[in-house]
Image (cartoon, rainbow, N blue to C red):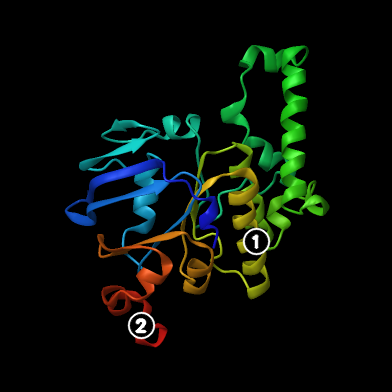
Amino acid sequence: MNQEHTGNDVLLEVHNISLSFGGVTAIEDVSFDIRTGEIRAIIGPNGAGKSSMLNVINGFYHPQQGSITYKGETRPQMKPHHAASHGIARTFQNIALFKGMSTLDNIMTGRNTVMTKNIIWQALYFGPALKEEREHREFVEHIIDFLEIQAIRKTPVGRLPYGMQKRVELGRALAAEPDLLLLDEPMAGMNVEEKEDMCRFVLDVNEEFGTTIALIEHDMGVVMDISDRVVVLDYGKKIADGTPDEVRANQDVVDAYLGVSHG
């Protein structure tokens, strides 16, 4: 684990969040925080409300109750454009890439939120816009080197194996230079080797870019190895919150999710 890199400053806090869909409760009165520089895991059985919580954090879902404090500013809900422009990036459970576009072009789309030149400059494509385009390409090339995907930079992503597509999606999220990176099951469907690679990249992103990470992951070995703190949801409620060792020893968690054999 990387607790020596974890600051005590709270980057984001959810206060008493409740979310329902047509009378069905997805999240019920959940509060927790994410500290600057940490890897924060959100775990729980299927249907526990984990992806719904990420969707609340980046503004896709609007809770009926509670508030979010991000970088010291409290609001009843986050809006997606506000989240994106203020440094929150996201990957998805189901890969959401442009399948016909190359790896390079997919990662370039992640730069949209940090481009400063307006559409007229970009259409004219000279002067400041050309200079900015070169700078963005340099940054994207750095990400491609970092993720070790130089060999597929011009390959349409639809032709890539699943594990590589997940790596490209991580690259696109990193292209936005996020302060907070939300990873929704980044290792789902991967073989052992692909999981090991993705674990290494998540740790490296946290360490080398200084990016705060909140992740949902079903592989408990992965969660316990790389997380600084873990919050556990079950049926939309928070049942535990603490270090991996504290959570592993929590009987409510064992009963709900991990199983006695993991104790």
Q: Is residue 242 left or right of residue 2?
A: left
Identify the residue shown where x is 51% and y is 74%. Answer: 221
Indicate the quadrant where residue 68 lies: top left
**Numbered disc 2: secondary structure:** loop
Indicate the quadrant where residue 210 lies: top right
Quarter of the image for the C terminus: give it: bottom left
Distance Cα–Cα, label 2 vs label 1: 27 Å
**Residue 234 percent across, percent down from the top left:** 28, 66
The residue at which mark 1 appears reads as 200
Quarter of the image for the N terminus: give it: bottom right
Which residue occupies the extreme right position in the image?
151
Identify the residue shown where x is 69% and y is 63%. Answer: 161
**Residue 51 percent across, percent down from the top left:** 39, 55
Which of marks 1 and 2 precedes in the sequence? 1
The residue at which mark 2 appears reads as 259
Q: Is residue 224 left or right of residue 13?
A: right
Which residue occupies the extreme bottom position in the image?
261
**Can residue 102 be seen at all in this image of the molecule?**
no
**Residue 78 percent across, percent down from the top left:** 35, 35
**Can residue 165 be seen at all in this image of the molecule?**
yes
Going by the numbered disc 1, the residue's amino acid type is: Arg
Identify the residue shown where x is 72% and y is 35%. Answer: 139
The answer to whether residue 127 is above or below residue 238 is: above
Which label is found at residue 47?
A: none
Answer few, some or many: residues within 10 Å of disc 2's Cα (few below 14, many 20 plus, some between 14 and 19).
few
Q: Is residue 75 left or right of residue 114?
A: left
The answer to whether residue 77 is above or below residue 254 is: above
Identify the residue shown where x is 36% and y is 68%. Answer: 46
Going by the numbered disc 2, the residue's amino acid type is: Gly
